[in-house]
Amino acid sequence: MATTGDNFIDKTNPNPYAQAIFLSQKIINNGFSAMWDAAQREDDEDNPLKYFSYAVRGGDFLKFKVGRPTVSLQVTTEDPMLYFQLRMTEGEVLLYLTDDPDDDSKINWDIKNWIFAFSVKIARKEVTKDSEEYKEFKERAGLPNSNFTLAALFIDASSTTRWEPDLSEFGDKNDAFRNLTPEARATFDSFIQRWLNVMKEKGQNILGYSAERQEDDELNEYAPTFPPTSIDYYCYPWKGSDGSQAPKDNIEFNALSYLMMCNFDSPPAGGAIEYTGPWVDDGDRGVIDMVPYPDTPMCYWDDSIDPDHPFRSRIEYHTGDNAAQDSQYQFSPQWWKPNTWMLSGPPRHSEIKVANPNNSRDTMKLQEDTKNTTASLGFRPGGHVVDLSGSTTFVFRADHSTPKFSTWTEMTFGISWSMSIAMASVEDGGLQFKIVDGSDKVNVSQTSAGNMSWSPPPQQIAETFKNRVQGGMESALSGVGNYLLYGLADQQRLFLPGKGSYLMKNPIFNSRGDLLVDLHFNGYSVHFLDETICVTNIDSADPPKQKKRHLRSV
């Protein structure tokens, strides 16, 4: 079965765009949720993410406490792109049913736990370079010396026109709301519009910011060249990890994509991108089959085949901890062993006990345990190799008990594995990781004790374990091999001067694990071809200075 990771590596393609960013519906809603959480901690009772109250002169009013707002991306239609879901945890609404001043007919409803969903459009505005908003973005992005046009992507409050009943919920007033008079509905819609306007005034309708290059001079001589020259926005469908599912609206793995062109190239007329596999992670984890874990052993009574051995028994296991939780497998640095991270996996146990149907005191009990599971990741300062290794213990025990005698056997298997990954530069200036030839090894030891004979013998079981784990390692390496090989092949293109380009050379780790890379200036002027640049922190986006020497202690 294909996994998200496989298809992300093999199928995704941003063509014809130069760059693409995909934000899942889940991550967008996490952003709104974070804004909502922050609003609850503020003293401002007029914050539209806490409380809203508005009345008109005629007496109509709407007041409610605000729940966590969410958006629903639409991928089966192009218009609208998304629906906004406004949650009202408690509140009240009063609406007159007509515009006739002599008609006093009205509704007055409790709106606890209402959800009102309505269509909105995504719009963009240019953020002026002299504004505080522009300065805050540059500081947050780590680009204090760069020059670009900044656009804010936001929910357009002027476009709230279409109510979506399938995503809305009005408690016991579902039918009544659907049958409101046009006049009452218009008043209610105007209240929602007012709430969105307040959101806009507070800057809480922002989906995100994007840097853009609109003029040739919007590029400092030594600033990165990443700002795109055009941006389209498009809702990208989730079709399952293998791309076989039909698109469906309101799935948290649908994505809002920023589709960008550079160098003033013309974007496609449709402002869209072809489906090319999963660009977001659906949360599925691929389990690497490196460790045997116990299933319930097979054991049952059958004296028809071999009356001398009526308990039919067998070890049952699988490789890979399918019950794994992220919190159970976390690498953590080791204070007693520098430059090393380790994890300890949880123990797993299974057992079964079966009795002779003719004698309840004649029993067979089988137990399986996986324990002492550890893995280690380490590097050598000044080197370019990452070492991975791990080990585990699998124990099988069988106990046959009768009123007259007891027999037992216990087999213990020690399993260890290791591999090394090397980093190097390539001719065109990028970096690559590669599995060191011959470094992927698996060893299995075995011991046994007891007075019961078991078939197959422990030596044969150990060989089976070795083959299964070796096969799991080879499968894992084939799945990530291309990713390791090409994942950083174009990394140097993220650090571009105003003219020419850089070539990465001599990658090494420092003592705390930072990646140090020599950047050689390529093109522009022959006088600088032998000058090098030291990148000590790849998280820094400040443009490097041109003649900084790389100093390395020997």
Image (tube, rainbow, N blue to C red):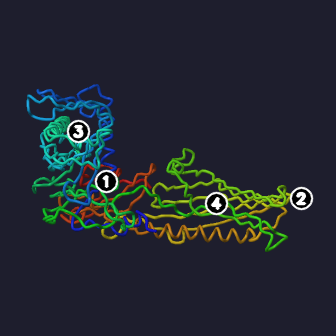
Amino acid marked by disc 2: Phe
Between the residue at mark 2 and the residue at mark 1, the CA separation in whole angstroms equals: 65 Å
Q: Within 10 Å of the Cα at label 2, are there few (<14), some (14-19), or many (20+) other Cα atoms?
A: few
Name the residue beneath numbered marker 2.
Answer: 405
Between the residue at mark 4 and the residue at mark 2, the CA separation in whole angstroms equals: 28 Å
Name the residue beneath numbered marker 3.
Answer: 204
Q: Is residue 87 left or right of residue 303?
A: left
Q: Within 10 Å of the Cα at label 3, are there few (<14), some (14-19), or many (20+) other Cα atoms?
A: some
Between the residue at mark 1 and the residue at mark 4, the CA separation in whole angstroms equals: 38 Å
Mark carried by residue 295 = 4
Q: Within 10 Å of the Cα at label 4, are there few (<14), some (14-19), or many (20+) other Cα atoms?
A: some
Nearer to us of marks 2 and 3 is 2
Q: Within 10 Å of the Cα at label 1, are there few (<14), some (14-19), or many (20+) other Cα atoms?
A: some
Amino acid marked by disc 3: Gln
- Residue at image coords 66%, 54%: 349
Q: Is residue 340 left or right of residue 452?
A: left
Name the residue beneath numbered marker 1.
Answer: 250
Q: Which of the 4 image quarters holds residue 312?
A: bottom right
* Quadrant where the image shows the C terminus: bottom left
Mark 4 near mark 2, Cβ–Cβ under 8 Å?
no
Mark carried by residue 367 = none
Amino acid marked by disc 4: Asp
SS type, badge 4: loop
Mark 2 near mark 3, Cβ–Cβ under 8 Å?
no
Residue lying furthest right: 404
The foreground one among 263 and 119 is 119
48 up-or-down from 246: above or below: above
Between the residue at mark 3 and the residue at mark 4, the CA separation in whole angstroms equals: 51 Å
